[in-house]
Image: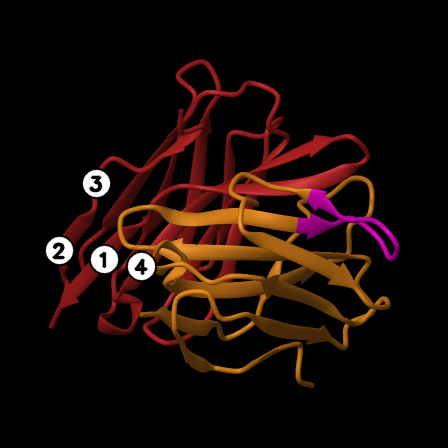
Chain colours: A orange, B red
């Protein structure tokens, strides 16, 4: 059971380049999320998708775009990478059902370095 | 302004003793609180949760306590084991605009010494 799969695991970009981080889940979850983790900052929400066909901004959306391609897949795009976007990116999914703790299941992360 | 705060960046305890990790929050509308554990080069994994209407939840060696009046929760690990060495994140669940979001603290790095 794969859970949440992210690709690539590592990426080095030059300032101004673009790239897309891919995420897929096989748990039939409704909601998907993108977080970034920086030292001393914890996990900060970039964008999320409560259900297929919807996307919303999180805490730090500037410089990013997302696409909820279908129920399984949620991609994160950097159109013009900046050194401030050097971070570890985590995709997560959750059932998104009303009531309950809404536990998120995370992928293994994608480490991005922007030079 | 951070809505979920973990004020201790690190904690070191002896194997077999109790580990207590603390978390404070500001938003009284949070309905659930969760703890996640993260090993290096892996994604966070869910550990335990507590509803805002409870004051305690226990799962094996892990117990979470919630003090709503103080807007404070804590995770107790008894007894602590070397394999518990990891970064622990406190998170609060917010249901708004027909969707859930998890807001995380900055994490506490726990080291359990053999």
Element under label 1? strand
Mark 3 to mark 1: distance in Å? 10 Å
- The answer to whether marks 3 and 1 mark residues whose Cβ atoms lie closer than 8 Å is no
Residue B60 on image: x %, y %: 46, 59
The subunit carrying tag 4 is B
Q: Nearer the viewer, residue B20 or A66?
A: A66
Visible residue check, residue B108:
yes
Q: Residue at x 61, y 72 (%)?
A: A20
Label 3 crowd (10 A; few <14 / some 14-19 / many >=20): some
Label 1 crowd (10 A; few <14 / some 14-19 / many >=20): many
Image quadrant of residue B53?
Answer: top right
Closer mark to the observer between disc 3 and disc 2: 3
Instruction: Give the residues in magenta.
Output: A48-56
Residues indicated by labels 4 and 2 sit on the same polypeptide chain: yes
Which residue is disc 3 drawn over? B8
Residue A79 on image: x %, y %: 58, 62
- The answer to whether marks 1 and 2 mark residues whose Cβ atoms lie closer than 8 Å is yes
Q: Which of the marked residues, 1 or 4, is nearer the chain's N terminus?
A: 4
Which residue is disc 2 drawn over? B12
Which residue is disc 1 drawn over? B110
Element under label 2? strand
Mark 3 to mark 2: distance in Å? 11 Å
Quarter of the image with the N terminus of chain A is bottom right
In this image, B82 relative to A93: left or right? left
Q: Which of the marked residues, 3 or 1, is nearer the chain's N terminus?
A: 3
Residue A26 on image: x %, y %: 76, 77
Q: Residue at x 36, y 68 (%)?
A: A114
Which residue is disc 4 drawn over? B87
Mark 1 to mark 4: distance in Å? 6 Å
Residues indicated by labels 1 and 2 sit on the same polypeptide chain: yes
Q: Residue at x 51, y 61 (%)?
A: A80
Mark 3 to mark 4: distance in Å? 11 Å
């Amino acid at each position: 059971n794969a859970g949440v799969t992210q690709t690539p695991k590592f990426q080095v970009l030059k300032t101004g380049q673009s790239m897309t981080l891919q995420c897929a889940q096989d748990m039939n979850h409704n909601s998907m999320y993108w977080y970034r983790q920086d030292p001393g900052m914890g996990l900060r929400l970039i964008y999320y998708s409560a259900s297929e066909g919807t996307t919303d901004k999180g805490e730090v959306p500037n410089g990013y775009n997302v696409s909820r391609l279908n129920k399984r897949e949620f991609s994160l795009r950097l159109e013009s990478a900046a050194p401030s976007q050097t971070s570890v990116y985590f995709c997560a999914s959750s059932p998104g059902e009303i009531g309950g703790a809404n536990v998120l299941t995370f992928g293994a992360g994608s480490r991005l370095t922007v030079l | 302004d951070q809505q979920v705060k973990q004020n201790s960046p690190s904690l070191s305890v002896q194997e077999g003793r109790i580990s207590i990790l603390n978390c404070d929050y500001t938003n009284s509308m949070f309905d659930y609180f969760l703890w996640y554990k993260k090993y290096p080069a892996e994604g966070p994994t869910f550990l335990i949760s507590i509803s805002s209407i409870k004051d305690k939840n226990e799962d094996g060696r892990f117990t979470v306590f919630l003090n709503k009046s103080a807007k404070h929760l804590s995770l107790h690990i008894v007894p602590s084991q070397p394999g518990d060495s990891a970064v622990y994140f406190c998170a609060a669940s917010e249901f708004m605009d027909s969707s859930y979001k998890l807001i995380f603290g900055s994490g506490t790095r726990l080291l359990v010494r053999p």
